């Protein structure tokens, strides 16, 4: 329709002022979609991190906290689970398998997880996919390590690489287990979960590197050399958490009750799905608030655009009168002004989506390394399209106001050109 | 479509903006087809109001205005808009052009809104662009200006672009409202000659209003609005 071409040319003619409007709208659209995308992807990422595990067991604390440190490797456990308790859980008649987890050390900012080879057999993520060894093999020697895909990529490690673990979970640690170097024997395929950012070693290895330590520090003269340890009893005294698989899911509540009422020490068993939901719900208000704020930002942008159009309308009465004199009907004038909002919103939306992808492309690795959340770059989801359509519709609806005024002007002015 | 022999026929026209203050009171005014008529009137004599009535933008409170045999008050506002777009070309005092369109695009504007004007051009076996180029050439506008922004043109050139726009698609009636008031005497004369020559070649009727009596001589007939407007006589 020619009148839309006119709208476009008119905008191009005033591009310096319109550009500011477009930029502010594009940023608001980017914010709106970004918040929604973050919400959806976080949820996806959360839900995909653990599947196939019926119960997560740790020392008694909050279920969200237990989930955060055991599965997401965020924060630190308050207490441990004793080896005896672990054995009791393991030998419960309804339990099919258990995977012990021992956390507390790190390697150049990546968490070190002490576990058993069962971990690679039973850990499931996403829709139930198992971990795949990309190169090498599962650990079987004491000082073997299996690293996640991100660890390998970011540190440039290959199978055969010698690594030294550090005590503590921070990025920088001053106490190194440099007397007992490890060797990378396997690299896992990418999963998009915190597994990618984990160094896996055996439980015995965790025990071995802490032999001769007291209260988190090496006692001089008491450390055992790597060679001397081989013969020692490396059964751990305690572990951090346990992943439990049951023979039947129906038994989950019974086993959960058994663990929660365990008398020897205070333990907590959580259903991962329930805890994930709880974790998600705790973020609910913040999420809603963010979405509401970003929607408001879009509205502010739209009102800015409308104000600009309304202000310019008086100066454009001549233009409208000329158009009327060459045969434009009042509704053409209406479409000309609505079209301007439409064109501006459309350009802003396209730019906003572009900016969103640009930001995501840059921020994706940063978010993954900082929060262990995988926010993959993907096409616009149905919900995102809806938000975009809502923003466009809001722009067009608000754009009806100046358009209606222009329509009234053009009826009143006719072809009379008022200077 | 039935056509009267008059391009414009006004009977007992009365118009007032405010109650009790008549602006126009014309017992009768007829303009034949193909005539070029100069309507003379001092400012405030109701010239612009008369043009709005002829264009069907305003309707009289009493009497009738017929254009090309069609009584404008018998048409609804939408039909009047369409009628105006199809049959009448306008030229105004100044700033006639859309600043963000090129010379060519400005001339082509009426063709965008009127299928009849497009058809007229097509009947000659031409594209609207060809016709626009031809018109501009006849009106002495160099071809190099075609794709220029109209803001780069002199006032005289702008008025000739406006004339080309009014004439494109050969509307039966061309209404001009003081189009030469911003031009000096030389340019004014050449503008009028070109406009009248071009409209004559299309058999378009020209109604030209101005307060400048010196222009009378260019036209086939002159009407003194102040003389026939009873409202002005009373006032």
Image (tube, rainbow, N blue to C red):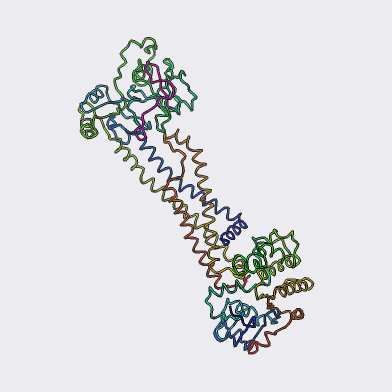
Q: In this view, does A318 lie to the left or right of B163?
A: left
Q: Where is residue B60 in the image (x, y as percent from the top left)?
A: 56, 82
Q: Quadrant of the C terminus of chain A?
A: bottom right
Q: Which residue is drawn at 69% across and 58% down?
A: B147
- A50 and A137: which is toward the camera: A137
- Quarter of the N terminus of chain A within the rendering: bottom right
Q: Position of residue A233 (x, y in %)?
A: 30, 13
Q: Which of A222 and B235 is in front in this view?
A: B235
Mark count: 0
Relative to A35, is A416 above or below?
below
Give the image location of residue B169, x and y in percent. Answer: 65, 69
Q: Is residue A91 above or below residue B154?
A: above
Snapshot quadrant of residue B13:
bottom right
Is A126 positioned to the left or the right of A303 in the image? Answer: left
Region rendered in magenta = A125-148
Does A286 lie within the magenta span?
no
Q: Is residue B205 above or below residue A279?
A: below
Report if residue A131 lies within the magenta region. yes
Looking at the image, residue A208 lies above or below residue A171: above
Residue A237 drawn at (x, y percent) = 29, 20
Q: Residue furthest right?
A: B186
Asked whether, in this view, residue A109 is left or right of residue B129, the answer is left
Q: Which of B40 and B147 is in front in this view?
A: B147
Residue at figure coordinates x 54%, y 56% from the top left: A343
């Amino acid at each position: 329709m020619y009148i839309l071409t006119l709208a476009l040319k008119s905008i191009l003619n005033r591009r310096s002022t319109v550009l500011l409007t477009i930029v502010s709208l594009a940023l608001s659209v980017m914010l709106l979609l970004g918040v929604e995308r973050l919400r959806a992807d976080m949820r996806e990422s959360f839900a995909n991190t653990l599947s196939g595990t019926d119960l997560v067991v740790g020392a008694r604390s909050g279920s969200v906290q237990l989930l955060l440190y055991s599965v997401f490797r965020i924060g630190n456990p308050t207490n441990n689970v004793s080896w005896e308790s672990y054995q009791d859980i393991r030998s419960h008649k309804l339990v099919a398998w258990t995977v012990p987890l021992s956390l507390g050390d790190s390697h150049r900012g990546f968490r070190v997880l002490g576990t058993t080879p069962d971990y690679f057999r039973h850990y499931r993520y996403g829709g139930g996919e198992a971990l795949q060894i990309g190169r090498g093999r599962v650990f079987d020697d004491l000082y073997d390590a299996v690293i996640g895909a991100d660890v390998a990529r970011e540190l440039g490690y290959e199978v055969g690489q010698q690594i030294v673990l550090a005590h503590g979970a921070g990025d920088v640690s001053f106490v190194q287990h440099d007397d007992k170097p490890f060797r990378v024997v396997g690299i896992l395929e990418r999963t998009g979960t915190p597994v990618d950012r984990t160094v896996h070693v055996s439980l015995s290895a965790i025990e071995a590197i802490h032999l001769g330590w007291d209260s988190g520090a090496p006692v001089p003269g008491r450390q055992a050399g790597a060679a001397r340890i081989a013969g020692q009893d490396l059964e751990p005294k305690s572990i951090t958490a346990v992943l439990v698989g049951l023979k039947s899911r129906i038994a989950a509540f019974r086993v959960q009750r058994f663990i929660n009422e365990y008398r020897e020490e205070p333990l907590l068993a959580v259903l991962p799905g329930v805890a994930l939901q709880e974790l998600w719900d705790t973020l609910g208000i913040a999420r809603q608030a963010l979405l509401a704020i970003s929607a408001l930002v879009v509205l502010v942008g739209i009102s800015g655009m409308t104000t600009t159009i309304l202000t310019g309308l008086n100066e454009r009465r001549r233009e409208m009168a000329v158009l009327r004199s060459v045969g434009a009907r009042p509704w053409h004038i209406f479409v000309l002004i609505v079209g301007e909002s439409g064109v501006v919103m459309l350009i802003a939306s396209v730019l906003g989506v572009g900016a969103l992808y640009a930001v995501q492309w840059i921020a994706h690795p940063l978010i993954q390394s900082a929060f262990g959340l995988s926010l993959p770059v993907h096409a616009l989801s149905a919900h995102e399209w809806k938000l975009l359509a809502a923003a466009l519709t809001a722009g067009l609806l608000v754009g009806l106001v100046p358009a209606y005024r222009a329509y009234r002007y053009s009826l009143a002015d006719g072809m009379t050109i008022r200077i | 479509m039935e056509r009267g022999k008059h391009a414009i026929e006004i009977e007992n026209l009365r118009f007032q903006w405010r109650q009790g203050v008549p602006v126009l009171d014309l017992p009768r005014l007829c303009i034949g087809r193909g005539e070029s008529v100069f309507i003379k009137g001092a400012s405030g004599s109701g010239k612009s109001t008369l043009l709005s009535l002829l264009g069907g933008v305003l309707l009289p409170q009493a009497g009738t205005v017929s254009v090309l045999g069609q009584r404008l008050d018998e048409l609804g506002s939408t039909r009047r808009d369409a009628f105006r777009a199809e049959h009448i070309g306008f030229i105004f005092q100044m700033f006639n052009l859309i600043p963000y369109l090129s010379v060519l695009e400005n001339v082509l504007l009426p063709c965008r809104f009127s299928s009849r004007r497009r058809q007229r051009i097509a009947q000659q076996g031409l594209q609207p662009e060809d016709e626009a180029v031809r018109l501009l050439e006849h009106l002495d506008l160099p071809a190099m200006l075609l794709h220029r922004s109209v803001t780069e043109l002199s006032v005289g050139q702008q008025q000739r672009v406006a004339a080309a726009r009014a004439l494109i698609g050969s509307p039966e009636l061309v209404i001009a409202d003081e189009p030469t008031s911003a031009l000096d005497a030389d340019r004014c004369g050449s503008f009028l000659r070109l406009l009248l020559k071009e409209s004559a070649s299309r058999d378009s009727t020209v109604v030209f209003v101005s307060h400048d009596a010196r222009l009378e001589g260019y036209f086939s007939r002159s009407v003194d609005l102040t003389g026939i407007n009873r409202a002005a006589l009373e006032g």
